[in-house]
Amino acid sequence: MNYTREAVGGHPRMSGPRRPPVPWWAAPLLWLGMVSMGLMAGLFYAFAVSVMPGLARTDDRTFVFAMQRINQAIENPAFATTFFGAFLFTGASAFVQYRLGMRAAARWVVAGLVLYVVALAITMGVNVPLNERLASAGDPSKIADLAAVRESFEGVWVTTNTVRALACTLALGCLGRALTLHGRDEVR
C-alpha cells in the first residue's frame, strides 16, 4: 500500500495501487460478449426445447431431411459472426478487465469464456461431425435405412446440444455478473 496525504488536514491515508483509467469501450466490449453469448445460449436453448422435440414427433424421412436443411441453412454470416463473436468478445473482455485491474470482473469473464470453450469443443468435436455424417448419408428418398441414420444421429446430438445450451446459459450468467462488477468498479 502507498501512503498519500489528504488535501485537507494532512493526515496520511492508505491507498491501493493506481489503476489505469477505464477506457469508454471496455463496458461495450463486455456487453458485446454478453449479447453474443446470449444469442448462442438462445439458439441452443431453442433447439433443446422446440426444434428437436418437434422433429422427434416426425417420421424418419422428415427428420433426416429437416436436419440436413437446417444444417445447411445455419452456415451463414449472421451465425458465424455470433458463434465466433461470443468467443472473441468474451476473450478480449477477459484480457481488458484483467489489464484494467478489475480482477473480480475478469474472473467472471474467464469463467464465462471457459464455459463457452466447453460449448465450442462439443460443437466441433461432436455436433459438427454428426451433421457432416448426416449430410453424407445423401438424399433421404434414396437412403435404404433411414431409421438407422436417424438413430445414429438424434440421441447423441440432442444430448450434446443440451449440454451446449447449459454451458452457454451459465456463461451468460457469468458475463452478466462481470458487467455488474465492472460497473461498480468503474464508479469508484
Image: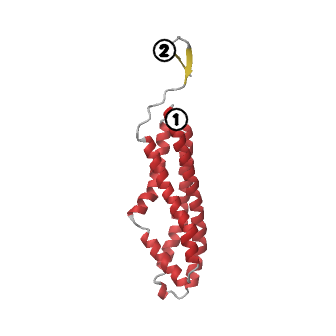
- At 46% from the left edge and 73% from the top edge, which residue is drawn? 70
* Amino acid type at image mark 1: Asp
* Amino acid type at image mark 2: Ala
> Can you see residue 87?
yes
- At 51% from the left edge and 82% from the top edge, which residue is drawn? 62
Q: How crowded is mark 2: few (under 14 residues within 10 Å), some or many (20 or more)?
A: few
> Can you see residue 114?
no
Q: Mark 1 points at which residue?
A: 185
Q: Whole-Å distance between the Cαs marked 1 and 2?
A: 24 Å
Who is closer to the viewer here, 59 or 140?
Answer: 59
Where's residue 53, x and y in %?
Answer: 58, 73
Q: In this view, does 36 lie to the left or right of 122?
A: left
As drawn, 139 above or below 24: below
Secondary structure category for the residue under label 1:
helix
- At 40% from the left edge and 62% from the top edge, which residue is drawn? 78
Q: Name the residue under label 2.
A: 7
